[in-house]
Each structure stands twice: as C-alpha cells, then as structure tokens.
C-alpha cells in the first residue's frame, strides 16, 4: 500500500466559560498569585461547570474545526478523541461526539495516554490518512480535569484546567507529517496517576474517603523526567526528519509548566517568540493543551506554509512524544 501525504485543514478550540484565577485559589488554598505564577507560569484556568462533560467541550472544538475547514460532519471519515476524562468508561467519548455532530455511523475511538494524547493521536491519525484507510480524520484532545482534581491539594489543584482542541487531517499530495518519536515507562505509575480508577483498585467507599479517585502527582520527579524526555524525543524526531534545530519555526509544547517549556526551548535553541505558550490562560489541560495552542496560533495568522513545527509532550503513564510537522497551504 503506497503512502499518501497528509495535512491539517481545520483547527478549532473551546474552553469552559468559568475562569478560576490564582487569586480565586487563594481563597481556599495556602498559596498566592505570586507563588503560582513564579513556579508554573499560570494565572488562570477554565473549569467546567457541574453539567459540562468532556464531550461537550470536544463537540464545540470540533464544530470550530469544521467551520474553519468549511466541511460538514459527514465529510469526516473517522473520529478520534484523546482524553483521560471520558464521559463514561464506555461508550468512547469519540462515539458520543460523532453522534452529536450527526455522523453516528462513522468509526470513532478514544486514545487514553494523558498529556501525550495529542502526540500519539497525531501519529495514529496521520498513519490512517497516509495509508489510505480514511481520507479525512477528526482528531480532538479534550479534558475536564477539574472533575478529578483534589481541590484541597495545593500541589495539583493549581495546575490543571479544562478545554478542548480539534484538528482535521486529510489526504494531500504534499506531506506535512515528517516524523514521530513516542515513548513510555510505566515502571512507576505512582509518579502521576489516579490510583482508584480502574480494575486494579476499583472505586469504593474507602477510596473516596482517601481521595484515591483523584489526581496524584510526585511533582519534583515528574518535572525532572519531563525536561529530559521532551528534549530527547524532540532530538530523535528531528533526526528522523533529517532536520536541524535551526530548521524549527515554531515549538508547540504541552503546557505543563512554564519552567519545563523554557528549559526545553533553551536546549533546542528556539527563541522565545517562536515558542507557543498559553499556559497563563489555561493551565495544564493535558491532551487538549497542544491542539488549543495550535488553533490559537493558526487563527492569529502566525503559521505560514512551509513552517516547520515541533509538537512535544510529556505526561502520565509516564509517556512522551514529539512530532515534526511542515505546515501546508
């Protein structure tokens, strides 16, 4: 089977209306705006309302991408949602989004690998298009992490937000996908996980009493691993694409922590005006962070045909990855 090219033809993003600022967090946590900003770069984050679910945010982002591409939902051949906060264990959130868009007979599935979700999803979706399996794929990163936050835990409550970003990929004579580098290491899942969330430790009354159904993170260890793995993945992706650091036009990293982003950008020698950051507005939205940042950058008219973009992420799993992408007209 001969490989075709792939390009992104649509982008969209959405965040809940409810904004939680650092000053708001001061009301119930032993923290301050200055402390949070200095250590994370975050100023605000959007949290879903009680009646908003992940599929609601994903739907809005998908509709935005369809408008951008001037396409109908039935023009999409496959739907993929990257999330660790699905509406249900099953059916897949992607199935719900496809049905609500009016494309209920189309194939749809979820990818659950936390903050690396969009990187893994972009690799999978590009493969589906390039191999000719599906000519057009909708890829969405969407999270409602506020639903699984321990809002009394200063180490995690300040970090995470909700949102969704969507891209539409389609077959093209010009190939935008240059390379991908993926990795994982689950030898120490307790570094970043939700302990009671599946068959290993099902949710019960004891788990709820101890907040084991909420996010737990060993921040210092995660920070060190994130910098190392993001740099390594980017180096390997560039080498696979036969590119140098100087060829990178934009670095669009997962928005986990401003200090992590700055460390990776410094090593990769990408000037600050070419590093896309919106962490001050959204915080860490896991699988949604990169597609939100991409959508905002595209809508701002900053990305031009021929620009080389490196998408890179690190997150729970542990997992990491980078994709080198050349923007097409």
Image (tube, rainbow, N blue to C red):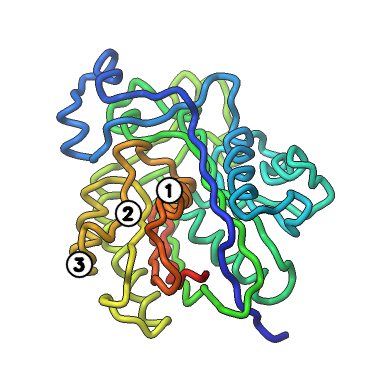
Q: x, y percentage for residue 132?
A: 72, 75
Q: Nearer the viewer, mark 1 or mark 2?
A: 1
Q: Residues within 10 Å of mark 2 (few under 14, many from 20)?
A: some
Outermost residue, right side: 105
Q: Any mark on residue 267, and which?
A: 3
**Is disc 1 in contact with disc 2, using a CB cutoff of under 8 Å?**
yes
Label 2, on which residue? Answer: 276
Q: Is residue 291 left or right of residue 80?
A: left
Residue that appears at 69% across and 63% down: 136
Q: Residues within 10 Å of mark 3 (few under 14, many from 20)?
A: few
Q: Is residue 318 visible?
A: no
Label 1, on which residue? Answer: 296
Q: x, y percentage for residue 55?
A: 63, 36
Give the camera-side residue of 146 and 326: 326
Q: Secondary structure at mark 1?
A: helix
Q: Is residue 18 left or right of residue 62?
A: left
Residue that appears at 61% across and 63% down: 169
The Cα–Cα distance between marks 3 and 2, rounded to whole angstroms, is 16 Å
Give the camera-side residue of 113 and 132: 132
Residue that appears at 20% across and 63% down: 271
């Amino acid at each position: 089977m001969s490989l075709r090219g792939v390009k992104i033809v649509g982008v969209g993003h959405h965040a809940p209306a409810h904004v939680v600022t650092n000053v708001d967090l001061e009301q119930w946590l032993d923290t301050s705006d200055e402390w949070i900003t200095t250590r994370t770069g975050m100023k605000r984050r959007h949290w879903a309302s009680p009646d908003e679910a992940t599929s609601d945010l994903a739907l809005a982002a998908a509709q935005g991408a369809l408008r951008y591409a001037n396409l109908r939902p039935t023009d999409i051949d496959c739907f993929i949602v990257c999330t660790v906060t699905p509406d249900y264990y099953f059916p897949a959130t992607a199935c719900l989004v496809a049905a609500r868009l009016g494309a209920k007979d189309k194939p749809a599935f979820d990818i659950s690998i936390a903050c690396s979700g969009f990187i893994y999803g972009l690799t999978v979706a590009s493969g589906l298009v390039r191999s000719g399996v599906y000519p057009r794929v909708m890829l969405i990163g969407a999270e409602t992490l506020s639903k699984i936050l321990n809002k009394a835990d200063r180490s995690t409550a300040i970090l995470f937000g909700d949102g969704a970003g969507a891209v539409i990929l389609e077959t093209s004579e010009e190939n935008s996908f240059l390379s991908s580098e993926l990795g994982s290491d689950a030898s120490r899942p307790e570094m970043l996980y939700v302990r009671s969330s599946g068959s290993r430790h099902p949710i019960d009354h004891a788990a709820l009493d101890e907040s084991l159904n909420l996010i737990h993170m060993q921040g210092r260890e995660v920070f060190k691993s994130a910098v190392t793995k993001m740099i390594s993945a980017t180096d390997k992706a560039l080498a696979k694409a036969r590119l140098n650091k100087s060829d990178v036009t934009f670095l669009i990293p997962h928005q986990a922590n401003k200090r992590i982003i700055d460390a990776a950008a410094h090593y990769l020698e990408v000037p600050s005006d070419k590093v896309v950051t919106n962490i001050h507005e959204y915080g860490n939205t896991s699988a949604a962070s990169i597609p939100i940042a991409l959508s905002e950058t595209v809508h701002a008219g900053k990305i031009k045909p021929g620009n080389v973009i490196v998408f890179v992420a690190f997150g729970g799993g542990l997992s990491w990855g980078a994709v080198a992408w050349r923007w097409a007209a």
